[in-house]
Amino acid sequence: PILASARKCFLSNPATSRQIVDSLPCGQRSAKSAAMARCASASLAFATLPILASAFVQRALPTGASASPIARSPRAVSPRSVAAEANTAVVAGGGPAGLATALILAQRGFDVTVLEKRAEPNPYEPQRAYLYLVDGRGQRFTDAAGLTEELASPATSVSSLNYTVTRCLPDGQREESVPPILEPSDRPSYWIPRARFLALLNSALPPTVTTRFGAELRELHQTPDGGVEVVASCSDGSELRLTPSLLVGADGLQSLVRQRCGEWSGAAAEYTPVVLPSPSSGLRYQMIKMPPDLRLDPKNASVTAQPRKAYSMRPATDAPLGPTRLGLLPVADPTFPRTANVILPPEHPVWALGSAEEVLGWLRATFPHLPVDDVVSADEAAAFAAGGPGG
């Protein structure tokens, strides 16, 4: 989900937007048809991915903001907004995209404030406990940030060249194999949990980046001089108001930054996310947290999952709600909880399970070769029933 093809980028200047998109490699140009409407505000951008953010920062900074070369675009940033608080930026959202953007902006000479509603820098969040596969494109960013060596450390991640997948079959058999390399490359990719990747990015932020945890973006206002005021509410009850020269939206699917860009440009439809046709379009997911060394055999307690291995739990042929699978990806840290991914169409009956006992009953009947009551707690089953699928 991260560091993949660029989705959308919005700037206050249409020509600059085109330059940014055209600067991306062919595989990252899905943003090319994105809206390029002008906003009567401070320079605004909506960036979903660090690699897109890197291209954006390279192209959109005012002359003199950095020693690094940038595109020659006389209207890349409004002079009025820059004069208010020169070389200041607010990044809405402290996830991987927001932190990566903040790091790049700091390298280019900006004083950056990151607004993040989470109370902690890199908590373990069960429903965001997915793993990222940082491939060669993502490593263009980690190279520039000086993070690739730590990313590649065996203590941090699992190399795509150094793990196996075990199929756990309903008859109790287990088949281990090496996953095929779909796209040969001169450098491996790395599996890393989201929480660990956030920690990696946070550790690299320089003193010119201030991260305000517990600060949730509430509103954006246009100022009389053509700038933008950012309003955030803080966990201590206070209110934060900032008038940066640059605002970056990394605030998720329901982005307030994107919404205001649409309203202020007079072309709201142009800022609607585009759903591209794909076999995975519309699928929903949930995670089920399991112990780091979860048992794989109900009759033999010594058979447990190994952290640097992936597992695919195959269903019984008479599974009551139809064939479903549980997938566990490899992790480097042997103490890190394992999360089983449940990925199904939105109309699947699994999403209608309404209680912990219903969830546990479904798991027992579908995966008889898994000691469900030992690896899934009642609280976890209740959370699955109450959480609702993401997608």
Image (tube, rainbow, N blue to C red):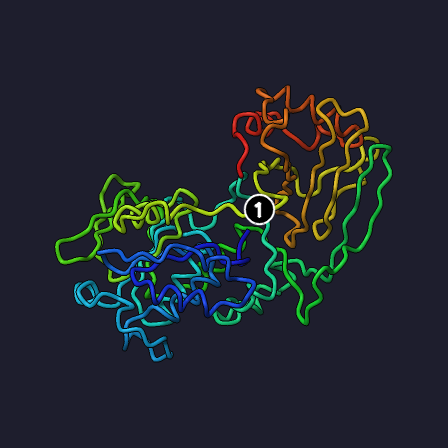
Q: Nearer the viewer, residue 285 or 241?
A: 285
Q: Is residue 22 left or right of residue 153?
A: left
Between 185 and 359, the residue placed more toward the observer is 185
Residue picked out by circle 1: 277
Q: Residue at x 58, y 63 (%)?
A: 151
> In this rendering, is residue 377 above or below 202?
above
Up/down of 199 relative to 207, above or below? above
Residue 68 placement: quadrant: bottom left
Residue 65 screen position, x and y as percent: 29, 74
Asked if residue 371 lies left or right of residue 34, the reply is: right
**Residue at the left extreme of this rendering:** 224
Q: Residue 89's x, y, as percent?
A: 29, 61
Q: Secondary structure at mark 1?
A: loop
Q: Position of residue 11 (x, y in %)?
A: 33, 60
Looking at this view, is 355 or 66 the one in front? 66
Give left or right: position of 96 versus 89. Answer: right
Count residues near mark 1 (Cα–Cα under 10 Å), then give few for <14, some for 14-19, many for 20+: few
The residue under the point 62% across, 33% down is 345
- The residue located at (44%, 61%) in the rendering is 100
Quadrant in which residue 149 is drawn: bottom right
**Relative to 121, residue 183 above or below:** below
Please identify the quarter of the rendering in which residue 79 is found. bottom left
Is any part of residue 52 visible from this angle?
yes
* 386 sits left or right of 46 in the view: right
- Camera sees residue 247: no
Residue type marked 1: Pro
